[in-house]
Amino acid sequence: MTRYEKEPTFQNNLLIYDGIYYQIGEEHKEFLAEKMMDDDYYILILAAIARELHIAGIYRAKVHLAAGLPLTWVGEQKEAFRAYLLQHESVDFTFRGKQFHVEFAGADIFPQGFAAVAEKLRDFKGVNMLADIGDGTMNIMYINDCRPVEKKCYTEKYGTNQCILAVRESMLKQLGTVADDLVVEQMIRHGTADIGERYLYVIQEAARKYTAEIFRKLREHEYNPELMRLYVVGGGGCMLENFGQYEKGRVTVINDICATAKGYEMLAARKLRKIGGVS
């Protein structure tokens, strides 16, 4: 996301809020341990709300937010993050040329990773490890006999953004140049990209080393493929599929990029039904 004080030339994903212009999707968001440290996540949330409302043809709405934090950060940061999301009772903004008026009815915060599989807990028989590999963090938790084990939840600052940084360093060291993040992201998602062979080799080799390190970190938390099954969610799942070495029959990669968002929605709706908030 790029911020402009004046109206930019290209406006495909332009969001206008409080007199400032935001081009959504232009630059990679730097990882922050606390999302409340700047306004970027708030602007991205407004863009996400606008996209969902536009699909339904709605431009004035009362919205209840469902969001998430890394597993081990929920307890400490949940209330602050909720206050951040609800910093305004209502907002008016423009996105992709459409005007929106949104009133906030409330917000619920859930643990990342777990939300993606919450509706499928009945499938987690025996001992299972769940790894949610996101942009900035990898969240790890055990789910044993369909129940999450709260004492065995871990957060590692080892997401796909760290892989991009490792690729940059490797390219600079070996080739004296760096590739655009878009190229690296294509490699992570698809295993290849439309670039020269020597660049392709260096990026692939760096990605393979990074993926091997992911499994090493999982083993630090007692991952043993012979004694448990591994489930992987988040954007880093495709990285494991493209570059990882593992027993395919004992590792399940959940490729639905909306799985976590669907989980947030399901958990929030369930909570609201209990208090009579939705039918």
Image (spheres, rainbow, N blue to C red):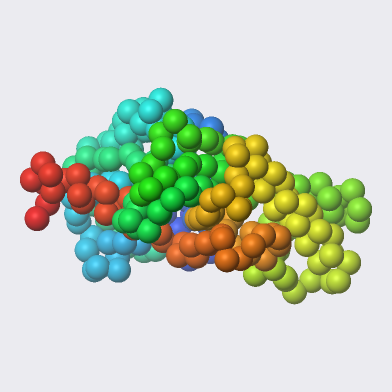
Q: Could you say where residue 231 lies in the image, as x and y percent from the top left? A: 51, 55
**At x 47% / y 48%, what residue is drawn?**
127
Tell me: 95 left or right of 99. Answer: right
Q: Is residue 42 visible?
A: no
Tell me: 133 left or right of 83. Answer: right
The C terminus - image quarter:
bottom left
Comparing 48 with 222, the one in front is 222
Comparing 268 with 223, the one in front is 223
Q: Is residue 104 visible?
A: yes
**At x 48% / y 62%, what residue is drawn?**
254
**At x 81% / y 47%, what residue is drawn?**
169
Q: Could you say where residue 188 lies in the image, as x and y percent from the top left? A: 66, 61
Q: Could you say where residue 175 lies in the image, as x and y percent from the top left? A: 91, 56
Comparing 116 with 22, the one in front is 116
Q: Does 98 appear above or below 160?
A: below
Residue 77 occupies quadrant = top left
Tell me: 272 left or right of 68. Answer: left
Q: Does 175 appear above or below 64?
A: below
**At x 71% / y 60%, what residue is drawn?**
245
Q: Residue furthest bottom?
A: 194
Q: Could you say where residue 68 lies in the image, as x and y percent from the top left? A: 39, 43
Give the mark count. Answer: 0
